[in-house]
Image (spheres, grey):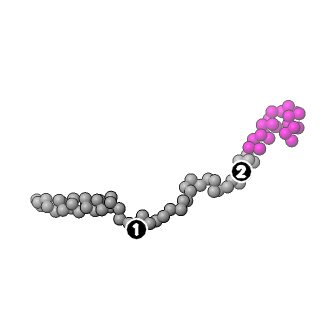
Amino acid sequence: MRQAALAEGSTGNLLRLSVAERERSRRRRRDPGRDEFFVPTPESLKWLDSVTLPMILTAAAVALFTKLLMMLPAE
């Protein structure tokens, strides 16, 4: 079909064929796994069980802040 359009010399038919080829290649089924943005990685959840230093420091800072607020005289 493409060679027939080339032999005739009509650019309209050739353009129509090239657009149809691109549409066919665009509509082809793609692997949905290739389109995933987030890739699941195996990760340990052990860190959820342990208390870390920033957690302790945050709790101490909140307790100190609330104690200071309670010490202010109520007017």
Q: Nearer the viewer, residue 10 or 42?
A: 42
Left of 28 or right of it: where is 68? left
Q: Quadrant of the C terminus?
A: bottom left
Q: Is residue 38 left or right of residue 10?
A: left
Q: Residue at x 64, y 56 (%)?
A: 32
For image coordinates 40% across by 68% down, the residue present is 49
Q: Is residue 4 above or below residue 32?
A: above
Query: Which secondary structure, mark 1?
Result: loop
2 within the magenta span:
yes
In the image, residue 33 lies at what x, y percent?
Answer: 63, 56
Q: Is residue 32 magenta?
A: no
Which residue is denoted by mark 2 in the rendering? 27
Return the residue nearer the eye: 16 or 69. 69
Residue type at the position of mark 1: Asp
Number of callouts: 2
**Which SS type dominates the magenta stretch?**
helix
Percent across and percent down for residue 51 are: 35, 65
Q: Residue 65 location in percent, x, y?
A: 21, 59
Q: Which residues are magenta?
A: 1-22
Q: Secondary structure at mark 2?
A: helix
Which residue is rendered at x = 72% and y = 51% of the image?
28
In front here: 16 or 21? 21
Q: Is residue 69 left or right of residue 24?
A: left
Residue named by callout 1? 49
Of circles 2 and 1, the one toward us is 1
> Badge 1 local density, few (<14 within 10 Å), some, or many (20+)?
few
Instruction: Name the residue located 42 percent from the left edge and 64 percent from the top edge.
Output: 47
Mark 2–mark 1 contact, CB under 8 Å? no
Amino acid type at mark 2: Arg
Front position in the image: 16 or 46: 46
Residue 59, located in which quarter of the rendered image? bottom left
